[in-house]
Amino acid sequence: MIQGRCPICSKPFSIDRIEDLPTFPFCSERCRLVDLGRWIDESYSIPGPPAELDPDQADAPPRPPESNGRARED
Ligand SMILES: [Zn+2]
């Protein structure tokens, strides 16, 4: 028996196995989504360095250097 309390709405629950509560540790899908929304809100509010991608480099795949070693003059 697993007893817990939903971290979102504080509703207590008791289950036999984790599998009985797919939304564990939340009591319901709704509370799970609420928690997910909080995480997303936090990550948006934290200012981070912008991901700078050089459009030229990002678009072109890396090419092996051209070699003219096969050209022979005999
Ligand atoms: Zn809940």
Image (tube, rainbow, N blue to C red):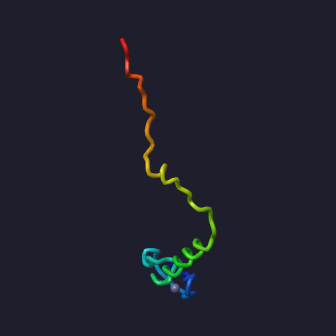
| Residue plotted at (37% across, 17% down) | 72
Residue under the image location 54 percent in, 88 percent down: 11
Tell me which corner region of the image, top left, top right, bottom left or bottom right, holds residue 6: bottom right
Q: Quadrant of residue 7?
A: bottom right
- Image spot of residue 50 (x, y percent): 59, 62
Q: Residue furthest top?
A: 74
Front-most of residues 26 and 73: 73
In this picture, residue 43 sits left or right of residue 27? right
| Residue nearest the observer in this picture, 16 or 70 | 70
In the image shown, does 19 or 64 lie closer to the viewer?
64
The residue most toward the left is 74
Q: How many numbered discs?
A: 0
Q: Position of residue 43 (x, y in %)?
A: 58, 71
Q: Nearer the viewer, residue 42 or 21?
A: 42
**Residue at the image position 43 percent from the left and 78 percent from the top:** 20
**From the image, which quarter does the C terminus lie in?**
top left
Picture coordinates of residue 52 (x, y %)? 56, 57
